[in-house]
Amino acid sequence: ERVVRIEGRVEQVSAEESDTYFHSRPLDSRIGAWASPQREVISGRGVLVANAAKYGAKFLLQPPRPPHWGGYRLTADRWEFWQGRRSRLHDRLRYAQQADGSWLRERLAP
């Protein structure tokens, strides 16, 4: 019974930054980026395992960043935290960034 909501500006990071982050990840994660046709319906986990074996054999220890893989940066200016309680008197806190860069903390009614 917990929710975090973040609002702010989102921007795509550069190809160079995506490359740097991709190459910092474990090898299995980099192969997995190639193996998973994200958001596509697959017949089962075997598809992922077979794809991972195929791309692992193809790229060995040096998989390049897939062309469809990249990053986004969220610059948050508002955070909201909600913690449920049986009594329905939930805790709900909001942090909002002010013009001077400080953060205003407010308790909201659930």
Image (cartoon, rainbow, N blue to C red):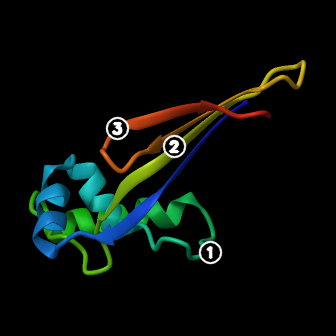
The answer to whether residue 52 is above or below residue 29 is below
Left/right of residue 76 with respect to residue 86 in the rendered view: left
Q: Amino acid at mark 3?
A: Ser
Upstream in the sequence, badge 3 or badge 2? 2
Q: Residue at x 87, y 19 (%)?
A: 86
Report the quarter where the C terminus lies. top right
Can you tell which of label 3 and label 2 is closer to the viewer?
3
Dot 2 crowding, Cα within 10 Å, few <14, some 14–19, many 20+: some
Left/right of residue 81 with respect to residue 69 in the rendered view: right
Q: Evaluate if marks 3 and 2 touch, with contact meaning CB atoms under 8 Å apart.
A: no
Helix, strand or loop for disc 3: loop
The answer to whether residue 13 is above or below residue 8 is below
Q: Which residue is mark 2?
A: 79
Q: Which residue is mark 1?
A: 41
| Mark identifier at residue 102 | 3
Q: Amino acid at mark 2?
A: Trp
- Rendering coords of residue 74 (x, y %): 37, 58
The answer to whether residue 64 is above or below residue 81 is below
Can you tell which of label 1 and label 3 is closer to the viewer?
3
Upstream in the sequence, badge 1 or badge 2? 1
Residue 17, located in which quarter of the rendered image? bottom left
Number of numbered discs: 3
- Rendering coords of residue 14 (x, y %): 17, 73
- Closer-to-camera residue (99/87): 99
Q: Residue at x 59, y 72 (%)?
A: 42
Report the quarter where the N terminus lies. top right
Helix, strand or loop for disc 1: loop
- Rendering coords of residue 38 (x, y %): 48, 71
The answer to whether residue 103 is above or below residue 68 is above
How far apart marks 1 and 2 lie (CA) works out to 33 Å
Upstream in the sequence, badge 1 or badge 3? 1
